[in-house]
Image (cartoon, rainbow, N blue to C red):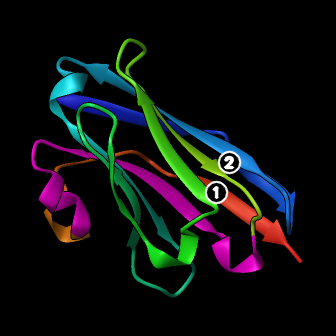
Amino acid sequence: QVQLVESGGGLVQAGGSLKLSCVASGRGFIDYAMGWFRQAPGKEREYVLVIDRSGVEIYNADLVKGRFTISRDNAKNTMYLQMNTLESEDTAVYYCAADYSASNLFHPRNVTYWGQGTQVTVSS
């Protein structure tokens, strides 16, 4: 079992940058594929980026392609989301997710472990 805690959210102007972190506690961080999801008010939770156990990005949603980067440091049990050129449409609660199966990270209903979320607000 793993517990996930996100941090780094906040208020930023359009065009700015933020870096989110997700720290995992518990055993076996390296055994999990990881992902970032987001949920805007009134909308369904959607995946943003997925990374495999070794740190290779395996999916990048079109809406963030070229602007967001996912990475992980297995020695620190931490995953990151670097967000650049932020837009007002990026305003959402961002969630960290983990699962043994990377394919489960494409469907929120299939994800095993979630963080509590961190709010990102982009002002225009």
In the picture, the quarter occupied by the N terminus is: top left
In the image, residue 4 lies at what x, y percent?
37, 35
Within-10-Å neighbours for mark 1: few <14, some 14–19, many 20+: some
Q: Residue 75's image quarter?
A: top left
Give how far across and how far down residue 105 sits, in percent.
23, 59
Please provide the residue range marked out in magenta: 87-106
The residue tagged 1 is: 119
Q: Secondary structure at mark 2?
A: loop
Q: Upstream in the sequence, badge 2 or badge 1? A: 2
Q: Nearer the viewer, residue 37 or 119?
A: 37
- Which of the 4 image quarters holds residue 110? bottom left
Q: Residue at x 24, y 67 (%)?
A: 106
Residue 23 inside the magenta-drawn segment: no
Give the total of numbered labels. 2
- Where does residue 61 sit, x and y in percent of width and height? 43, 71
Q: Residue at x 54, y 68 (%)?
A: 65
Q: Quadrant of the C terminus?
A: bottom right
- Asked which secondary structure carries label 1, the reply is strand
Q: Residues within 10 Å of mark 2 (few under 14, many from 20)?
A: some
Q: Where is mark 2, residue-wise?
A: 9
Q: Is residue 77 left or right of residue 70?
A: left
User: Are dots 2 and 1 in contact, CB under 8 Å?
Assistant: yes
Is residue 94 shown in magenta?
yes
What residue lies at 73% left-to-right and 48% top-to-bottom?
Answer: 18
Name which residue type carries label 2.
Gly
